[in-house]
Structures are given as C-alpha cells and as structure tokens.
Image (tube, rainbow, N blue to C red):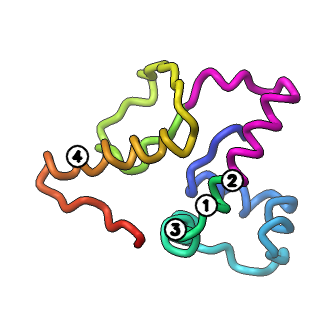
C-alpha cells in the first residue's frame, strides 16, 4: 500500500495479521478507532520530527530501490470538502520535500476552513 488514510490503515489492521503484529496487537485485541492514529501524529508526535524523518527515509529507500520515482505525490482528502469525486483525479508534480508539502497543505486546509466559516485546525506548540 503506497499511501493510506487512517481509515484504510485500520481496515488493514482488522484483517492483516502482519499489521496487527507491527502495531503490537494480538488476534483478540480490539482495533483502535482510526482517529487514534491521526491524533497521535498531530498531538503525540507534533513536537518531534521523528515521524517526518521516518517517512522521508522510507520514501528515499523506495526511490533507491526503484519502487517509486519520487516525481509525484498523491494525498487523500481527509480534511477537504466531502463532495470530492473519486473518478476525477488531478495529477500534479511536486518539487518540494514531503515536510514542506505538508506545511503548504495544512496552510491551504486552514484557508479553506476559514473561507467556509470554520476555525483553522488547532496547531501543536
């Protein structure tokens, strides 16, 4: 799986024993809610760049082994309006690091939320 949303990850953990092993769950342990993973990323690891370093290293190794070419980045639309169509994808070349891209993406999400009368997402300090 090249990229996964927290919801997709939870579905994989429910049915894939290797995923359960990786996250430390036995076959009978309950699977956490999908928001647990995204909230940990934002809250627990928000003060650290270890999450980003791990991600960057995985991407670099995948490029080195020819699994990906590193020229395109696809992201799910977790925080975007729900009227997105799965049949309409927009390919876009990204020439920034994944970390820079995430900063830019979070800024765009906040701008969109403000335009729609919502508060920006809470940032970790």
Q: Which residue is mark 3?
A: 46
**Mark 1 and mark 2: span between their CA atoms?**
6 Å
Looking at the image, tell me whether mark 2 or mark 4 is earlier in sequence order. 2
Closer to the camera: disc 4 or disc 1? Answer: 1
**Mark 4 and mark 3: span between their CA atoms?**
21 Å
Label 2 packing within 10 angstroms: few (<14), some (14-19), many (20+): few
- Check the image and report above or below for 102 versus 62: below
- Check the image and report above or below for 67 versus 82: above
Q: Which residue is mark 2?
A: 53
Q: Which residues are magenta?
A: 54-73
> Secondary structure under badge 1?
loop
Label 3 packing within 10 angstroms: few (<14), some (14-19), many (20+): some
Looking at the image, tell me whether mark 4 or mark 3 is earlier in sequence order. 3
**Mark 4 and mark 1: span between their CA atoms?**
24 Å
Looking at the image, tell me whether mark 3 or mark 2 is earlier in sequence order. 3
Q: Locate residue 6: give its quadrant.
A: bottom right
Residue plotted at (47% across, 45% down): 102
> Secondary structure under badge 3?
loop
**Mark 3 and mark 2: span between their CA atoms?**
13 Å
Asked whether residue 115 is drawn in magenta, I would say: no
Label 1 packing within 10 angstroms: few (<14), some (14-19), many (20+): few
Q: Say which mark, if any, is on residue 49.
A: 1
Looking at the image, tell me whether mark 4 or mark 1 is earlier in sequence order. 1
Q: Locate residue 24: give its quadrant.
A: bottom right
Q: Tags 2 and 4 in contact by the CB under 8 Å rule?
A: no
Left or right: where does residue 29 sit relative to residue 101? Answer: right
Q: Which residue is mark 4?
A: 111
**Mark 2 and mark 4: span between their CA atoms?**
27 Å
Percent position of residue 16, x then y: 81, 57
């Amino acid at each position: 799986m090249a990229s996964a949303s927290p919801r997709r990850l939870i579905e994989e953990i429910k049915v894939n024993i290797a995923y359960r092993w990786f996250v430390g769950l036995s076959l009978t342990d309950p699977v956490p809610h999908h928001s647990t993973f995204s909230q940990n990323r934002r809250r627990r690891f928000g003060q650290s760049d270890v999450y980003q370093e791990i991600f960057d290293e995985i991407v670099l190794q995948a490029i080195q082994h020819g699994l990906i070419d590193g020229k395109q980045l696809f992201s799910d639309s977790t925080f975007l309006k729900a009227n997105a169509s799965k049949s309409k994808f927009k390919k876009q070349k990204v020439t920034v690091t994944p970390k820079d891209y995430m900063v830019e993406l979070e800024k765009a999400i906040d701008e969109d939320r403000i335009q729609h009368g919502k508060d920006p997402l809470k940032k970790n300090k």
